[in-house]
Image: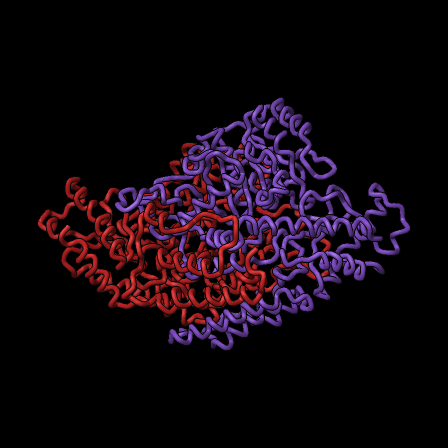
Chain colours: A red, B purple
Amino acid sequence: MNGCHESDIETFLKSVFDLVLKEGVTEINDRTKPVINFKTPSELKQILDLAIPAKPASHAQLLEYCEQVFKYSVKTGHPRFFNQLYAGLDPYGFAGQVVTDVLNTSIYTYEVAPVFVLMEKYLLDHVCHLIGYKEGDGTFSPGGSYSNMLGMNLARFHKFPQVSKTGMRALPRIVIFVSKHSHYSNKKNASLLGIGSDDVIAVATDNSGRMDCSDLKQKIEEAEIQGATPFLVIATCGTTVLGAFDPLEKIADICEDKKLWLHVDAAWGGGVLFSSKYRQLCKGIHRSDSVAWNPHKMLMAPLQCCVFVTKHSNKLVKCHSIEVPYLFQQDKTLYSSEYDIGSKVIQCGRKVDVLKLWLMMKAHGSTGLETRINKAFLNAQKLTKLVEVTEGFELVCKPECTNVCFWYIPKRLRSLKWSLDDDNFCRKMAQVPPLIKEGMTQSGSLMVGYQPLDGKPSFFRMVVINDKVTTDDMEFVIKEIDRLGSDL
Amino acid sequence: MNGCHESDIETFLKSVFDLVLKEGVTEINDRTKPVINFKTPSELKQILDLAIPAKPASHAQLLEYCEQVFKYSVKTGHPRFFNQLYAGLDPYGFAGQVVTDVLNTSIYTYEVAPVFVLMEKYLLDHVCHLIGYKEGDGTFSPGGSYSNMLGMNLARFHKFPQVSKTGMRALPRIVIFVSKHSHYSNKKNASLLGIGSDDVIAVATDNSGRMDCSDLKQKIEEAEIQGATPFLVIATCGTTVLGAFDPLEKIADICEDKKLWLHVDAAWGGGVLFSSKYRQLCKGIHRSDSVAWNPHKMLMAPLQCCVFVTKHSNKLVKCHSIEVPYLFQQDKTLYSSEYDIGSKVIQCGRKVDVLKLWLMMKAHGSTGLETRINKAFLNAQKLTKLVEVTEGFELVCKPECTNVCFWYIPKRLRSLKWSLDDDNFCRKMAQVPPLIKEGMTQSGSLMVGYQPLDGKPSFFRMVVINDKVTTDDMEFVIKEIDRLGSDL
């Protein structure tokens, strides 16, 4: 076995830390370096020596492997990475993650995670307070999809507590309402929970992508007439593509009237709660029954960092706890079993995700986090303006969040009449983004995603998050896309 | 906001790395230091300054917070930590985790995780090969419970593909068979999936905790007579408490005969696949339809590191994929969409858990990992012998795995007749472990768990994993429990 000598291992780990600092921290903001050094799967398979050997590799060889991993991985912390709903890396969050890594424990009992259990409880209370819940409970989770699943499961249990034991067989047809722009996890979760994706009913949106409340009301009533039992509305704060915020106050009125659970998927947009300037985008969120929020998105916490909270204090434990004598001993003498928080989740072992968030909140203070959120909005507004005034760029809709969605029109198409009803025009426009994307990937200059929506041809979605991004970067994005695309 | 100067942040991160090395690597094997510095929840709340401030904390203050986290956290890497089904920390795994942290990406598309997508595919193929699947597919998952849930979901979809769209309403009553010693996640998952925990049918075990196959057959036939539809048997390789391995060949015979999906929960015991000496404990595992295995348990990979594999190559993608134009673009020009592996899982964003496992496999080679597994078994055998020959210790059953389960009998109870049928005797015996546990927690000398089982009074479960553990540590465990308990 490798590493017989402790001091050798220390030296090796120090070399890894040096490499990590260089690649991930010191040089990550160097705009002259590429965001990605792209290789196709077949090229990369040739380069990487993936095979597991019988005998140990040397420390020097292991370091080379690490260097290779850095060389061919995407630099998501680079200020020109705008491809996903995460970007950048908070260094204090990273520090908290490394401390968590080495402490290597699971957050299910106070016995093995005393500090993290108290810290998680504190932070979840803090999030409940930010949302405006008077009381509440919650958990960290492995992803936004998972948090939405928890909301769906609690909502079902709230209305039909017998479901835990007897399953869906004992229930009527139950239906869920989401905006048509809501995240795809809602359908996947309905399949998983045995509800079925057909019973996730899509509600129309307005031109900005927000849920249309008169359509919501109508769809609920139609379902009732068909004999189905509505039990849940999932509203979104910050939709995945357009970044739209559903009108929570109006939706909450309907949910209160119809006695439906309101779950808010604020995985992306929940970050605005930290900004006194933008938190009104989530107005009414305190009236929800549960909320999913991912600090690893807008807040720049390291992946994974996801929070689920509910205003119903005992619902998680009622829904999920079962007797587990080997883990949650009831005859413990040194502390109360309420601190064995594993009983309220579905998982057994659960990764500790709280320290990174807590440490970065300490490091920046609430004012620092507010500054970060406001800066991202400012950059997105700058980009929006540039899109509006630059030839060849066309905004998809006025952004509410820090996603800026736009088409780019190559020179040869600019003389055509702008018409999204014209199939021929749309087909030509749809061919543009994949080619520009290919160009930026090959040059490594920039990473931005694209997609079609509602029958509209593919457009770019620029997501602004990283606090190292400047207004100059916004200008670069415009120039670079124009450079790559004007002659297509 | 904190950390305006990049060089300050580097200095801070270097100090954190120094602390991490000292606390988590250099001093972790020092047996003169406590495994835990226990404080009650109310004491610890007084010590920790959890509140989120408005203004940034200084780097010095942040370092103090990190020091405090170390001071009051459990040292799960300490050679006297035997409390859970994880222990120790592979330093190469840790290095891989830190590299993963700083690269901070999600493994759903090749576009943002090219190296990790290929590496994950390679390692999953490797695991399929170890199991003996001729072909297969899989994914890393956030936990063993989650992996078992994937097995349950695939099994249901395999028999009733319509369930994804129309839910459980369209299905007959479907039932699942597990041994009564199987993990509690199976019940929780059945509740979650809308099957209902009542339809998880417990099968009897033999004296060593292995599934009783004649009872399995009988339970299946009883369910059929009652009009239920069996679809899944979940066997366990390494049960949570006793470490029993269910007889897979016999169970596979029954599953083949009855056309049932066989899922193997090898979260704990799957590590033996790396040992030519002990892999026969999983004999027949190649005949299963799916397997859950957690390298973060017996293999000492850092948490979280969990694998789910199935022999059915296209089942995951068929069960889980839906159209997601914003993420899985079908008109990509540089690589085939088969490399966008996010379409085969339920999650959207997913943490990268492969690099830590891959790097430690490179570092030790397969021979090194085999040595590690064999050493844990050797230590467990040594402990078993000590339990057998030492006065006051009584083995619960001969261990198959590296869990060693035993009672400790204080002096005053040694004159009583040993009778597990005697309620009075059992009540007295059940009071012993919580008090010894309190003693070891207060002194910080040792961490071992305990639980009752099948009406038997609570006993200790020693789990041997960490490769720093020696036979001297096994002797220490015996002496320390005797010291803490003899006069109780």
Q: Farthest residue toward the right?
A: B415
Q: Residue B271: x percent and y percent?
A: 59, 46
Is B32 left or right of A458, judged from the image as shown?
A: right
Classify the position of the N terminus of chain B by image quarter: bottom left
x then y, percent, for residue B463: 67, 51
Residue A3: give x, y in percent of width and height. Answer: 55, 60
Query: Does residue B319 sit above or below A408 in this rendering?
Result: above
As drawn, B298 above or below B309: below
Quick check: can you spot residue A231?
A: no
Quick one: quadrant of the C terminus of chain B? bottom right
Q: Residue at x 40, y 45 (%)?
A: B342
Decide if residue A66 is on the left or right side of residue A327.
left
Q: Position of residue A175 (x, y in %)?
A: 44, 38
Q: Is residue B219 left or right of residue A151?
A: right
| Image quarter of residue B284 | top right
Residue B28 shows up from this direction: yes
